[in-house]
Amino acid sequence: MPIVRVEVCGVEEKDLPEKLAEKIQDAFAESFASSKRHVDVRVAAAPPSRFAGLYEPNDEPVWVDILMREMPGLAERRGKVLAFSEALSKILGRDAGAIVLHLHAAQKDRLSFGGKLLTDLEKSKKSP
Protein backbone atom coordinates (compact mmCIF):
# COMPACT_ATOMS: atom_id res chain seq x y z
CA MET A 1 0.00 0.00 0.00
CA PRO A 2 2.88 2.47 0.11
CA ILE A 3 2.19 5.67 -1.79
CA VAL A 4 5.27 7.59 -2.91
CA ARG A 5 4.96 11.17 -4.16
CA VAL A 6 8.07 12.67 -5.71
CA GLU A 7 8.54 16.30 -6.72
CA VAL A 8 11.73 17.06 -8.63
CA CYS A 9 12.56 20.75 -8.22
CA GLY A 10 14.30 22.87 -10.81
CA VAL A 11 13.25 20.90 -13.92
CA GLU A 12 10.50 21.05 -16.51
CA GLU A 13 8.11 18.12 -16.85
CA LYS A 14 9.53 17.31 -20.31
CA ASP A 15 13.03 16.96 -18.84
CA LEU A 16 12.16 14.22 -16.36
CA PRO A 17 13.80 10.88 -17.18
CA GLU A 18 11.78 8.37 -19.19
CA LYS A 19 9.80 5.84 -17.14
CA LEU A 20 10.76 7.71 -13.97
CA ALA A 21 7.76 6.54 -11.95
CA GLU A 22 8.53 2.92 -12.78
CA LYS A 23 12.20 3.33 -11.85
CA ILE A 24 11.20 4.90 -8.53
CA GLN A 25 8.68 2.11 -7.93
CA ASP A 26 11.45 -0.47 -8.48
CA ALA A 27 13.85 1.40 -6.17
CA PHE A 28 11.24 1.73 -3.43
CA ALA A 29 10.24 -1.93 -3.65
CA GLU A 30 13.89 -2.97 -3.36
CA SER A 31 14.82 -0.50 -0.61
CA PHE A 32 11.75 -1.16 1.51
CA ALA A 33 11.44 -4.90 0.71
CA SER A 34 7.95 -4.31 -0.63
CA SER A 35 6.04 -5.93 -3.47
CA LYS A 36 6.34 -3.67 -6.52
CA ARG A 37 2.71 -4.20 -7.48
CA HIS A 38 1.60 -2.71 -4.15
CA VAL A 39 3.63 0.52 -4.50
CA ASP A 40 1.90 3.53 -6.07
CA VAL A 41 4.17 6.31 -7.34
CA ARG A 42 3.31 9.82 -8.50
CA VAL A 43 5.99 12.07 -9.97
CA ALA A 44 5.83 15.81 -10.62
CA ALA A 45 8.26 18.46 -11.75
CA ALA A 46 8.62 21.84 -10.08
CA PRO A 47 10.16 24.03 -12.79
CA PRO A 48 12.22 27.06 -11.80
CA SER A 49 9.14 29.28 -12.21
CA ARG A 50 7.32 27.28 -9.48
CA PHE A 51 10.18 26.79 -7.07
CA ALA A 52 12.34 29.18 -5.07
CA GLY A 53 15.24 28.48 -2.78
CA LEU A 54 18.92 29.09 -2.22
CA TYR A 55 20.13 26.31 -4.48
CA GLU A 56 22.53 26.08 -7.38
CA PRO A 57 21.32 24.48 -10.62
CA ASN A 58 21.17 20.67 -10.30
CA ASP A 59 21.38 20.99 -6.50
CA GLU A 60 17.67 21.73 -6.06
CA PRO A 61 15.88 19.37 -3.69
CA VAL A 62 13.80 16.36 -4.57
CA TRP A 63 10.84 16.27 -2.20
CA VAL A 64 9.54 12.79 -1.41
CA ASP A 65 6.46 11.97 0.65
CA ILE A 66 6.02 8.35 1.66
CA LEU A 67 2.74 7.12 3.08
CA MET A 68 2.91 3.64 4.55
CA ARG A 69 0.34 1.42 6.18
CA GLU A 70 2.66 0.88 9.13
CA MET A 71 5.95 2.55 9.95
CA PRO A 72 9.02 0.32 10.38
CA GLY A 73 11.03 0.65 13.58
CA LEU A 74 13.69 3.35 13.79
CA ALA A 75 16.72 1.13 13.13
CA GLU A 76 15.05 -0.55 10.15
CA ARG A 77 13.77 2.81 8.89
CA ARG A 78 17.30 4.28 8.87
CA GLY A 79 18.58 1.57 6.54
CA LYS A 80 15.58 1.77 4.21
CA VAL A 81 15.72 5.58 3.99
CA LEU A 82 19.44 5.52 3.22
CA ALA A 83 19.02 2.85 0.51
CA PHE A 84 16.08 4.66 -1.11
CA SER A 85 17.82 8.06 -1.01
CA GLU A 86 20.90 6.61 -2.66
CA ALA A 87 18.77 4.88 -5.32
CA LEU A 88 16.89 8.13 -6.07
CA SER A 89 20.19 9.98 -6.24
CA LYS A 90 21.42 7.61 -8.97
CA ILE A 91 18.12 7.65 -10.89
CA LEU A 92 17.86 11.45 -10.89
CA GLY A 93 21.54 12.36 -11.07
CA ARG A 94 21.28 14.45 -7.90
CA ASP A 95 23.40 14.42 -4.78
CA ALA A 96 21.88 12.21 -2.09
CA GLY A 97 21.90 15.26 0.19
CA ALA A 98 19.30 16.85 -2.09
CA ILE A 99 16.81 14.02 -1.49
CA VAL A 100 14.36 15.11 1.22
CA LEU A 101 12.21 12.21 2.46
CA HIS A 102 9.13 12.74 4.60
CA LEU A 103 7.82 9.50 6.04
CA HIS A 104 4.29 10.01 7.23
CA ALA A 105 3.04 8.29 10.37
CA ALA A 106 1.26 4.96 9.99
CA GLN A 107 -1.65 5.52 7.61
CA LYS A 108 -3.97 2.57 8.14
CA ASP A 109 -6.39 4.73 10.18
CA ARG A 110 -5.75 7.94 8.21
CA LEU A 111 -5.93 6.99 4.56
CA SER A 112 -9.11 6.19 2.65
CA PHE A 113 -9.88 4.68 -0.71
CA GLY A 114 -13.35 5.36 -2.10
CA GLY A 115 -14.37 6.94 1.20
CA LYS A 116 -13.44 3.91 3.31
CA LEU A 117 -10.53 3.97 5.74
CA LEU A 118 -7.78 1.52 4.93
CA THR A 119 -8.28 -0.23 8.25
CA ASP A 120 -11.99 -0.79 7.39
CA LEU A 121 -11.11 -2.11 3.92
CA GLU A 122 -8.72 -4.61 5.49
CA LYS A 123 -11.42 -5.76 7.92
CA SER A 124 -13.97 -6.22 5.12
CA LYS A 125 -11.50 -8.36 3.12
CA LYS A 126 -11.04 -10.67 6.14
CA SER A 127 -14.78 -11.01 6.81
CA PRO A 128 -16.59 -13.87 5.03
Image (cartoon, rainbow, N blue to C red):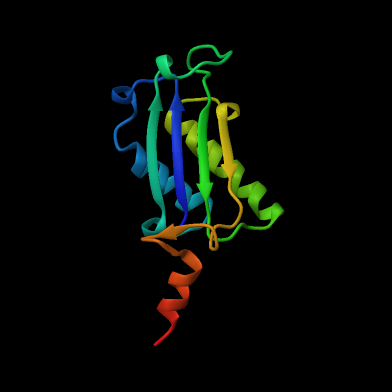
Q: Residue at x 42, y 15 (%)?
A: 48
**Residue 82 quadrant:** top right
Q: Position of residue 127 (x, y in %)?
A: 43, 84
Q: Position of residue 90 (x, y in %)?
A: 47, 32
Q: Give the vertical position of 80 relative to 35 (above or below).
A: above
For the C terminus, which image quadrant? bottom left
In the image shown, does 61 or 26 lie closer to the viewer? Answer: 61
How many numbered discs? 0
In the image shown, does 80 or 7 lie closer to the viewer? Answer: 7
In the image shown, does 67 or 30 lie closer to the viewer? Answer: 67
Q: Residue at x 50, y 39 (%)?
A: 87
**Residue 38 quadrant:** bottom left
91 left or right of 55 in image: left
For the N terminus, which image quadrant? bottom left
Residue furthest front in the image: 115
Residue furthest bottom in the image: 128
